[in-house]
Image (cartoon, rainbow, N blue to C red):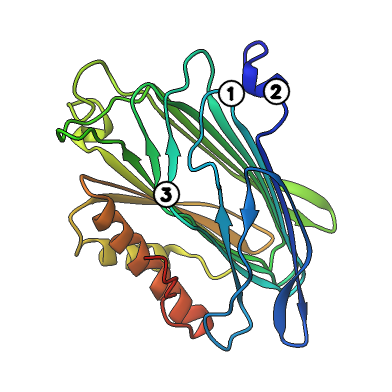
């Protein structure tokens, strides 16, 4: 970042801290703290696996200019968390500054985290930065899915947001220290005029991302997921990270003209992982 900004000097608009531990066969929150415009709803269990599901809520309803949100989540050894949001994250106009979310995720040995927020919607003249720092152990399992959608006006014309910067830094921790597994940077600056024109995301308007870190990730899994995406109206690419301490990362990017289509695509990919690795059905989050 070049120079001080409003979001860097103002106090955070929302703070959330959540620590998940495993006790008596179930995952529970051993620490929970919130301040300002962030909180979580009461925990619930979608099946008998012991995985706990928390729903992140922003009572303010949207991110505005100079807003800073801090989220800190720790999933302890053997614990299992599904973290989602109550509704879409909306970024409105941010004149003179930008909205920012900083998230820190730490996974212990044998810990599992599924991060499945609703779509991020960027409206006209919105600038947003999202920085996610992830620390895993070699036996951890991480699945993060996200969809980016441009906002729409009542007459059906797309709003043109200014800029989106999303950065994921993933570090594998061993007894010898931490080593960088992946640095995933995404910068989107729609050109003047039609945000779906050539040169902007290959003519597509919506972007879906899936990040998976697990010792069971390999080329065969990447090929299988890519074949699965062929049944959807989207353009998809998949890449693998290097392998550190036996664990590997996978990054899937998918372009489409539809939020629903990307949600179906990412849902199909995560459903495959849930069933194969954990014997679980796709989650029924019952938000609507």
Marks 3 and 1, Cα distance to the nearest angstrom? 19 Å
Q: Residue 66 got which mark?
A: 1
Question: Which residue in the structure is indicated by mark 3?
Answer: 88
Kindly indicate the quadrant of the structure image that contains residue 281: bottom left
Residue 105 in the figure: left or right of residue 243? right
Marks 1 and 2, Cα distance to the nearest angstrom? 7 Å
- Residue ID at (33%, 69%): 268
Percent across and percent down for residue 222 are: 39, 62
Q: Secondary structure at mark 3?
A: loop
Q: Secondary structure at mark 1?
A: loop
Q: Would you say the residues marked 1 and 2 are in contact, meaning their CB atoms lie under 8 Å apart? A: yes
Mark 1 packing: few (<14 Cα in 10 Å), some, or many (20+)?
Answer: many
Residue found at the far front of this picture: 59
Residue found at the far left of this picture: 155
251 or 105: which is nearer to us? 105
> Considering only order in the chain, which callout, 2 or 1, is on the residue closer to the N terminus?
2
> Considering only order in the chain, which callout, 2 or 3, is on the residue closer to the N terminus?
2
Residue 262 in the figure: left or right of residue 45? left
Q: Secondary structure at mark 2?
A: loop
Q: Quadrant of the N terminus?
A: top right
Question: Which residue in the structure is indicated by mark 2?
Answer: 10
- Residue ID at (54%, 41%): 60
Percent across and percent down for residue 188 are: 38, 28
Q: Is residue 205 above or below residue 83?
A: above
Kindly indicate the quadrant of the structure image that contains residue 257: top left
137 or 21: which is nearer to us? 21
- Residue ID at (17%, 55%): 233
> Considering only order in the chain, which callout, 1 or 3, is on the residue closer to the N terminus?
1
């Amino acid at each position: 970042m070049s120079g001080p900004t409003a979001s860097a000097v103002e106090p955070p608009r929302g703070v959330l801290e959540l620590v998940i531990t495993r006790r008596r066969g179930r995952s529970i929150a051993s620490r929970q703290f919130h301040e300002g415009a962030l909180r979580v709803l009461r925990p619930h269990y979608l099946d008998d696996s012991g995985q706990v599901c928390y729903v992140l809520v922003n009572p303010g309803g949207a991110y505005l200019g100079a807003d800073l949100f801090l989220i800190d989540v720790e999933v302890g050894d053997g614990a299992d968390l599904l973290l989602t949001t109550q509704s879409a994250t909306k970024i409105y106009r941010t004149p003179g500054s930008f909205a920012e979310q900083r998230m820190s995720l730490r996974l212990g040995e044998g810990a599992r985290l599924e991060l499945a927020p609703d779509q991020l919607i960027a409206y006209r003249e919105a600038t947003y930065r999202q920085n996610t720092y992830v620390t895993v152990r070699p036996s951890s399992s991480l699945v993060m899915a996200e969809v980016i959608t441009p906002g729409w006006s009542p007459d059906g014309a797309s709003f043109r947001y200014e800029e989106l910067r999303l950065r994921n830094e993933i570090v594998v921790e061993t007894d010898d220290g931490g080593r960088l597994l992946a640095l995933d940077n995404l910068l989107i600056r729609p050109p003047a005029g039609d945000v779906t024109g050539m040169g902007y995301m290959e003519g597509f308007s919506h972007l879906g991302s899936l990040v998976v870190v697990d010792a069971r990730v390999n080329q065969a899994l990447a090929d299988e997921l890519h074949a699965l995406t062929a049944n959807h109206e989207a353009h998809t690419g998949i890449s693998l990270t290097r392998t550190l301490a036996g664990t590997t990362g996978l990054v899937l990017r998918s372009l489409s003209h539809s939020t629903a289509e990307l949600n179906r695509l990412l849902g199909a990919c995560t459903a495959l992982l849930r069933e194969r690795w954990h014997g679980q059905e796709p989650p029924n989050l019952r938000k609507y």
